[in-house]
Amino acid sequence: MSPSSVGVMIELEGLTKRYGEKIAVNNLTFTVRPGIVTGFLGPNGAGKSTTMRMMLGLDRPTAGDVRIDGKHYDQLKDPLKYIGALLDAKAVHGGRTAFNHLLCLAQSNGIPKQRVHEVLDTVGLTAVAKKKAKGFSLGMGQRLGIAAALLGDPQILMFDEPVNGLDPEGIHWIRTLMKSLAAQGRTVFVSSHLMSEMALTADHLVVIGQGRLLADTSMADFIARNSRSYVRVRSPQREKLLDVLHQAGLTAQDAGDGALEVDGGKAEYIGELAARHQLVLHELSPQQASLEEAFMQLTAESVEYHAHSGTPAAPQQWGEGWKKG
Amino acid sequence: MAATQVVRSEWTKIRSVASTVWTLSLAAVVTIALGMLISALSKAEFDNLSTRDRLSFDPTFISFAGMSLGQLAMIVFGVLVVSNEYSTGMIRVSLAAVPQRGTFLFGKIAVATALALAVGMATSFAAFFLGQAMLGEHKASIGDDGVLRAVIGGGLYMTLIAMFSMGVAAMLRSPMLSLGILMPFFFLISSILGNVDATKKVGQFLPDQAGSKIMQVVTPIGDDTPYGPWGGLGIMALWVVAALIGGYVLLKRRDAQ
């Protein structure tokens, strides 16, 4: 009756959601594997939450399919025993106590009452179990949502932006929890719009932008490919420096502002090289392209809400029309 | 079995929010108290009535006069039971736990209906006996012809009003929108349609007008209603079935939000 203890996968096949003319999710195909934390990354409005709602059978796909352990969500008997999800921590009736909130969910899936006490203890809410949820802070609400996800001891866990609005202690707690769930062999799928957050927790990365799949890669590969380190060098004797670098077998690129970006050499070595050739350096600094930059580059094309940094159009000169008239 | 799990879960939901207690107790208190008051006033008025009105005097029906107001609390109960899920966002958690939407909706409605029936029946019997006590020598007895049917019918009427509200709320989702339509409809529009000659024929078939026929024991002189007490309750039941089917179809088709 309960799902097998071997890992359970989520498979998305051509998943598409269309609202009228607008495509929120566009032909997504990927697999979420057990035993690791899979990060689901994308800018705001990329379609992450819509995808997650379709995975839970809440929203109907326009096309495509999601299968959990090979089955459709509504074919799962007592689904909370297969998959636990935290979509929105505020989705609780404020007048109900934490205990009763969890109890009604447990009963709907035939989960014993004892388990409610256990998950309350796991998330550290035992002391407020008899308190109404409307008095809960954001962090407590998040913990209650996670308790609900853990109720059925599921093999798959899904969290939508779980660290949003949490204090550092809460963030640390959630990261540790996700890693330990994955280490137990469970499938952990977590969405975020922050690359830095994913870099700390995820082992695998699925990136989407405007509903389309942009990357499906291991975190290690993504870092290796995207976190380029180089040395920024600026010299009044630019041409000479280029020759010297070339002779030393180092490749240099124009940084665009007169400086050079040198790959494959340490700052110390480049400094010594310049000294040996008696070249004046105005700048010598080691640089690391951040993962956040790599993520922004990847999704730049697909960001829906750009902040425009250009200067506004010049106002019409006062009196211009008046003179003519 | 999934359905019993859902019923147990919905029972926990309904008993763990304050609105259940206050709406149902308000429905009972208002119906009984107003019924007693109007019964007492009718007793005082009786001697001034014309012969025609005395022949139409229906002590049973008079003791249910409070239902016109008490039913509004029943409507609030029915609306909140369903629309709470939407206004709090709980619907997504609920449907992730119970993806069989029909089982979810009808499990919820079954639990709420059972509770409304228990409160409705208790209220109807209390309103009858306390109302008759106020009527003194003009009172009816529970053993009289048609009286027990009317008292049980009063309990059924309140239950059906709650069920109709649940169906409407399942279609509209928003508690404010549902209440904003149902409250004026049952409190004003229905009685206006039923009292204006031009619309009387239509008004007779509205759920509350048709349903309340069951509580009548003495047919007023000149009454030309084309259905009897059970026929009227049947018309009301059809409205309820239509509202519930509408709610189910929309829940089944729509995204959960």
Image (cartoon, rainbow, N blue to C red):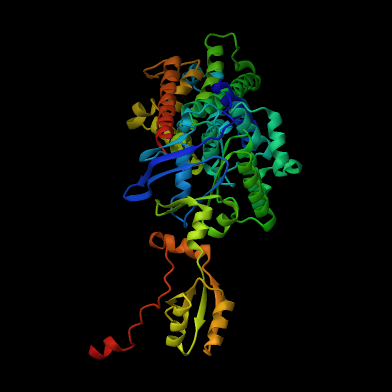
Look at 76% across and 43% down and name the residue there.
Answer: A127
Report the residue at 50% width, 43% height from top. B176
> In the rendered image, which quarter contains the N terminus of chain A?
top right
Which residue is pictured at 59% across the width and 20% down the height? B121
A137 over A258 or under it: above or below: above
* Quadrant of the image occupied by residue A30: top left
Left or right of B96 on screen, residue A25 = left
User: Along the line of sight, which residue is nearer the eye, A152 or A198?
Assistant: A198
Please provide percent x and percent y for residue B252: 42, 32
- x and y percentages locating residue A183 in the rendered image: 63, 42
Can you say whether B67 is above or below A59 in the image? above
Left or right, B247 with reference to A185: left
Q: How many marks?
A: 0
Q: Residue at x 63, y 31 (%)?
A: A106
Please state which of residues A27 and A255 is positioned toward the viewer in this rendering.
A255
* Residue A194: % across, % down: 54, 58
